[in-house]
Structures are given as C-alpha cells and as structure tokens.
Amino acid sequence: MDNMPVLTVPLIEGMKVVEYKGFVSARNVRAINIVRDMFTSVRDVFGGRSGSYQDVMSEMEAEVMREIRFTALSMGANAIVGFTIDFDNIGSKNTSLLMAFGKGTAVVVE
C-alpha cells in the first residue's frame, strides 16, 4: 500500500488512467500541548523554525497519506491523482488544534 503513487498532478507521462474511482479524502486533527506552544511562542519572538511543530506536521502528513491510500485501495484504485494537502490551525485563544486535510481522485492506471 505504501508504494501506491499519490500524485499532485492529474497525470504523469507514460501512465494511462483507465478508470476513475472517485473522490478520496483524509483528515487528521491534533491538539498541541502547552509546553510545545510555549517554546513556539518564544521562537515567534526571536525568529527561527519550530522543530516540534514540524515533527507533528510530518506525522500528520504520514497519517493522512496512509489513510487516503487505504481508502483508495478499498475502492479498487491503484493510484491517486490531483492530490493536495492543507494544514490549518483551528484552535482558539485557549486551545491549539492543528488540522491536516488531504484530497485527491482515486484512479486505476496502467
């Protein structure tokens, strides 16, 4: 399943879509802990990258990819085209939630 192509483009030269199986999507929402938020706030003041947030986002991306591949496979597809993934902070002043949403089209390619 991990070797199923997930492409951001509608098609790659040499691949022929023989069947469109339909829309697939996956989402992942994580609560970010207060300690991580404090360190990120300090980095915001002084600049720099937040390695802890990047790690969480990488984990979320991997989970979205696993879930969307599983969904496409269960539909009989062997690839996903037109894939996009978006991240958004959906928290408020008192909570911090990070959301990842991936979508694409499940297809059968030759």
Image (tube, grey):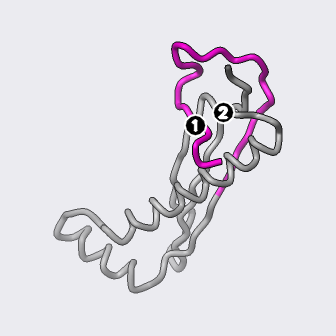
**Residue occupied by mark 2:** 79
Q: Nearer the viewer, residue 107 or 96?
A: 107
Q: Choose top left, top right, bottom left or bottom right for residue 14.
A: top right
For the point 79% across and 31% down, which residue is it? 22
Callout 2 secondary element: strand
Please give the count of numbered marks on the rendered protein: 2
Q: Are marks 1 and 2 in contact (CB under 8 Å)?
A: yes
Q: Position of residue 65 (x, y in %)?
A: 59, 50
Which of the two residues, 20 or 53, is positioned nearer the viewer here? 20
Q: Residue 62's x, y, as percent? A: 54, 56
Point out the residue furthest to the left here: 46
User: Type of residue at label 2?
Assistant: Ala
Q: In which image quadrant can residue 29 be found? A: bottom right
Residue 20 located left or right of residue 86? right
Q: Residue at x 68, y 47 (%)?
A: 68
Residue topped by disc 1: 6
Span of residues in magenta:
1-27
Q: In the displayed structure, does residue 97 sit left or right of residue 24?
A: left
